[in-house]
Amino acid sequence: MGASAQQRRKRRAIVIGGSMSGLFTAAFLRRIGWEVDVYERSSVELVGRGAGITSHPELLEALAKCGAGTRNLGIEVERRLAIDRRGRIVGERPLRQILTSWDRLQSLLRETIPAVRYHLGRTFQRVEQDGTQVCVRFAEGPTERADLLVGGDGVRSGVRGQLAPDVQPAYAGYYIWRGAPNEADLAPATQASIFPHFTFFLPERQQVIGYPIAGLDNDLRPGHRRYNFIWYRVGDAQELEDMCVDEDGRRHEFSVPPPLIRKDLIARMRAEAAEIMPPAFLDALANIAHPFFTPIYDFAAPRLVFGRVALVGDAASTARPHMGFGVAKAGGDACALAEALRDCENIDAALARYDAERQPMGERIVLHGRKLGTFLGVDLATEEDRRMSKLLMDPGGQLDWIAVPNFLAA
Ligand SMILES: Cc1cc2nc3c(=O)[nH]c(=O)nc-3n(C[C@H](O)[C@H](O)[C@H](O)COP(=O)(O)OP(=O)(O)OC[C@H]3O[C@@H](n4cnc5c(N)ncnc54)[C@H](O)[C@@H]3O)c2cc1C
């Protein structure tokens, strides 16, 4: 092995955030011979972040390339359906898609990293840099030094907050109610009608989506799976502010931890659902013991690199979730970063290449998400917005555009 390869082996990265983009980054950097430590602020293992994740070819490719693999990834559906209030099918498309879960991806990615390199209970506080090294301070303890700091710390990234404080996520003007009832609790009619498919229901300026995902501990056996339920609703900033007051009267800035969501909000949501939803989706909602809401935000940072600091995943750009592409984007960011560092001996040149490649990509995905969100009828500013909104209010438009693969190539 040559001198430069030996030198490369000594390079070290600190990754902030132990979720999707942090783990992808660690996995990819390890493959090019870097020493990587991941620091996650949560003091307990990240499990049960509930959500179902639509997969895309780019996600499968990133999982394969970084060494995590795609075994037992999830449930394959073969069809998409749109139904009306009475449950009748009003649109249909054949489309094979693997629906996975955040938990499954987390466990596959974690297996690529030695346990001693994954540090729980470490909260990023500040970074200082001198042109060739970063020095990172944590709330809980010792300072760490490395050649590179990667911020994979999500939409409210503290790393980005220090280096680009003006870059702030913007509220989209809508939020979702969600939850994942057990397959076994659903009525037989629900299990037979909507459960096996990627199903849409489209009341005016709303959207209900459901699809099957693995059960607890990635249980893929029929009867042991869950159903991912998502209900998009319009609500202005004032309404969101009110929703962010919890059961104890405390105000939260962005969203409320699920157990603290006010009971009156949940009761009102259930009553409103009863007015509009088809029986199968109502049944799914009735079997969610603790529904919770997530406000939708987006932004794209104008730069992803600040000296020896790079942003990846949601910290770099967060799109509205209509494409179901966030994790695939995180994998793509991490892969591009590692490939640039592999190909360029000079770290700064590699980071410049990463920025040039992935910043425009993040921006493009964010813009696409806004386009797909037009059916909710919020802030339709241009003729194109109104045309898109109309197209997507039609069941066929939804089946053709929402969370479909290969949208970047189209
Ligand atoms: C409703 C909804 C549905 C979605 N559906 C899909 C889908 O179907 N398919 C898909 O691909 N994507 C989907 N996404 C997007 C996907 O969840 C995100 O893109 C993905 O989780 C981003 O991963 P990340 O690692 O960049 O950020 P995150 O998952 O947010 O992780 C950031 C991590 O950083 C840690 N952290 C934060 N601050 C600090 C700090 N100061 N110090 C140390 N650690 C810190 C956090 O604790 C967290 O673990 C959806 C998102 C939403 C909201």
Image (cartoon, grey):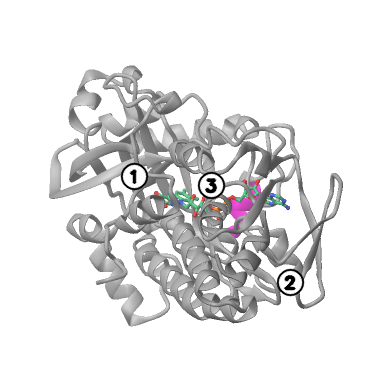
Front position in the image: 154 or 298: 154
Label 3 or label 2, whichever comes before in sequence order:
2
Q: Is residue 319 above or below residue 295?
A: below
Q: Is residue 238 magenta?
A: yes
Where on the picture, by quarter, is residue 155?
bottom right
Label 2 or label 1, whichever comes before in sequence order:
2
Question: For the view shown, which residue lies furthest in the front direction?
Answer: 1
Amino acid beneath label 2: Leu
Label 3, on which residue?
294
Amino acid beneath label 1: Val
On the rendered image, what quadrant is the N terminus found in?
A: bottom right
In the displayed structure image, the side of residue 155 where residue 70 appears, left or right? left
Label 3 or label 1, whichever comes before in sequence order:
1
Question: x and y percent of residue 403 in the render?
Answer: 31, 55
In the displayed structure image, the side of residue 97 where residue 358 appears, left or right? right
Q: Is residue 153 visible?
A: no
Q: Is residue 106 visible?
A: yes
